Image (spheres, helix red, strand yellow):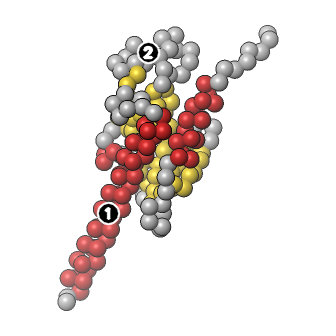
Amino acid sequence: MSKFTELQAAYLRATSFRASYWEGVIKTVQSFQDDLKSYLGVTGDQKVEVQGLSPQPVVSIGWFNQVGSFEPWAITSLPKSGDDLQFALRLVFGNDFNGETPAKEVFTLSIRGEPEPALWTVTVKTDDDVRRIRVPGFLELNEYLVNSVIQKLKPKTLEAP
């Protein structure tokens, strides 16, 4: 076997490994989306009207456009950074026409594989927190996301002038 053939074989092994890695990451994000819908008790295509817009899916995966607004993206098109797949998760849960109460929440997440098979680290960034959760399953992650929204929605007491 020539050195060039050896080099090509090493290259093919490396590209095959990376393709398999990203396939696993993409499947895990899809599973997370499905698991979150199940955790919330919503159907796969359930939608909510939001502030007069067309109905929006309760759970959406996507990323941010040039002005920083969430847009749904195909999971296979999400940005990669090193071993991380970056994505945004939008939860839509209300329809306040006055705009006083948030009707949706968008989280910034990234996911990366760990050396142990079927183990992933998910990083969740919120306005006031960065949380890393190691997941073979998604219960802890789902609870964290939903509880974060519930905390934001708790009424604030008014202060006397």
90 relative to 123, above or below: above
Pick the front one: 6 or 22: 22
Q: Which residue is mark 2?
A: 51
Q: Is residue 86 left or right of residue 124?
A: left
In the depicted structure, whether residue 65 falls above or below residue 109: above
Give x and y (percent) for residue 30: 37, 46
Q: Residue at x 44, y 54 (%)?
A: 84
The label on residue 157 is none
Q: How many marks?
A: 2
- Residue 137 versus residue 52 in the image, above or below: below
Mark 1 is surrounded, within 10 Å at the Cα level, by few (under 14), some (14 to 19) or many (20 or more) other residues, namely few
Q: Is 136 positioned to the left or the right of 10 in the image?
A: right
- As measured in the structure, the alpha-carbon distance from the residue carrying label 2 to the one carrying label 1 is 41 Å
Instruction: Give SS at disc 1.
Output: helix
Q: Residues within 10 Å of mark 2 (few under 14, many from 20)?
A: some
The C terminus, quarter of image: top right
Name the one closer to the observer, 36 or 55: 36
Question: Which element is circle 2 on?
Answer: loop
- Image quarter hosting the N terminus: bottom left
Taking the view exactly as shown, the residue that stands out farthest to the bottom is: 1
> Quick one: which residue is furthest to the right in this view?
160
- Residue 111 lies, in percent from the top left, at 46, 52
Question: Residue 20 — which label?
Answer: 1
Name the spot of residue 153 as percent of width and height, x first: 60, 24
- Residue 71 visible from this viewpoint: no
x 38%, y 55%: residue: 25
Residue type pointed to by label 2 = Gln
Q: Position of residue 155 (x, y in %)?
A: 66, 20
Residue at the spot x=52%, y=42% of the render? 142
- Dividing the picture into quadrants, the one containing residue 57 is top left
Dot 1 amino acid type: Ser
